[in-house]
Amino acid sequence: MKNRWARWISAILLWSALGGLFALPGLSSGSWRRILLASFAQWWSWGLVTPLILWIDTRLPFKENQLVRRVRAHLPVSVAITVLYGYVAMSMGALFGLQPWSVMARPRLLALIQGLLWSWLVYWVIFGVYQTFRYYQHYLASELRLARTERSLSEARLNALRMQLDPHFLFNALNTISAQVERDPRLARAMIEHLGDLLRLSLDARDRQEIPLAEELAFLDHYVAIQKIRFAENLRIEIQVSPEVKYALVPCLIVQPLVENAIRHGISRRGSGGAVTVTAGRAANQVEIRVVDDGVGLPPGWTLETSSGTGLSVTRQRILGLHPDGNSRLSVRPRNGGGTEVEISFPLRFAGAS
């Protein structure tokens, strides 16, 4: 009901504004009142007739892109509506006291023809404006549907990538646990507890593509605990997080595969083990996360684009999917002094911020 009243009020204001606009050139004369009333009579009459034009147009059996057929159908309609408008305008003029009611029965032929020609042109202006409005309305609706479809496809693709990554991690974690079952059952039970917590956190975040960094690091803590049990003194892991990015949004399950790569491909291949350092901080309007290890380093000729590793390739695709505009970055390079350094950055955003 409120929307209907708002439309009626908007229509009245529109046609009144047109009446006032077309009356402006004559308002400086002594008969300004008569000129203003005559202009209002004309445009308010169009305000009464226009709903009929639009109603007829919506009943035509043509699609939005069949404009030529629609124009042809409006040709006879435009003549009839223009004649109808002439009588509505004369009635409005008589109602305002601008002319006697008898003029409707004996209109002046020349004035009538001139008025009908002008009114016929106004009819087609109204028709053109309405078709333009319908076109852009249809265009915006199509764009909205396309955006929703693209967003759904993007979310489906990202979920598929997560499904590809989670089993990969679970398989590696179970292998680590199985190696300890007979050797040290107590350690195996502790690892299973951490794995249970990992699965719970993963399920809690399954419907979210992005989570606060603090939640991501809580997930990482359980993974690190499993690996520390496995490698004991041979693995040292340090995590340093700036307080200003602790609750920044990051892609879910984005840090763990980088740490896993550092351990599997860098640290585990050294008999003496090594260290992995995870740092997170702010750089301008970006949150930057670095995973650095002092392991064996990258093989000769290695590039991120040709890498066949599941963790890095899936991570790269997820980053591109979440930030296709290029505001995110993933780089992998050799570390000075040996080892590998991985850096990822994302736009600095927080939950609930626009």
Image (spheres, helix red, strand yellow):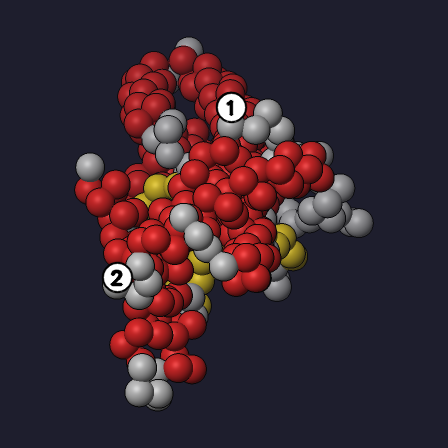
Give the labeled residue for mark 1.
163
Residue appearing at x 30%, y 27% in the figure: 204
Pick the front one: 109 or 72: 109
Q: Judge depth for marks 1 and 2 and give the one in front.
A: 2
* Residue 347 image position (x, y, % from top left): 45, 58
Q: Which quadrant is home to the N terminus?
A: top left
Q: Is the residue marked by circle 2 packed among few (<14), some (14-19), or many (20+) residues within 10 Å? A: some
* Residue 42 image position (x, y, % from top left): 39, 60
Residue appearing at x 31%, y 17% in the figure: 189
Marker disc for residue 96: 2
* Residue 46 image position (x, y, % from top left): 41, 52
In the current view of this chain or complex, which residue is farthest to the left? 2
Above or below 286: residue 180: above
Q: Which quadrant is home to the C terminus?
A: bottom left
Residue appearing at x 39%, y 82% in the figure: 26
Q: Amino acid at mark 1?
A: Met
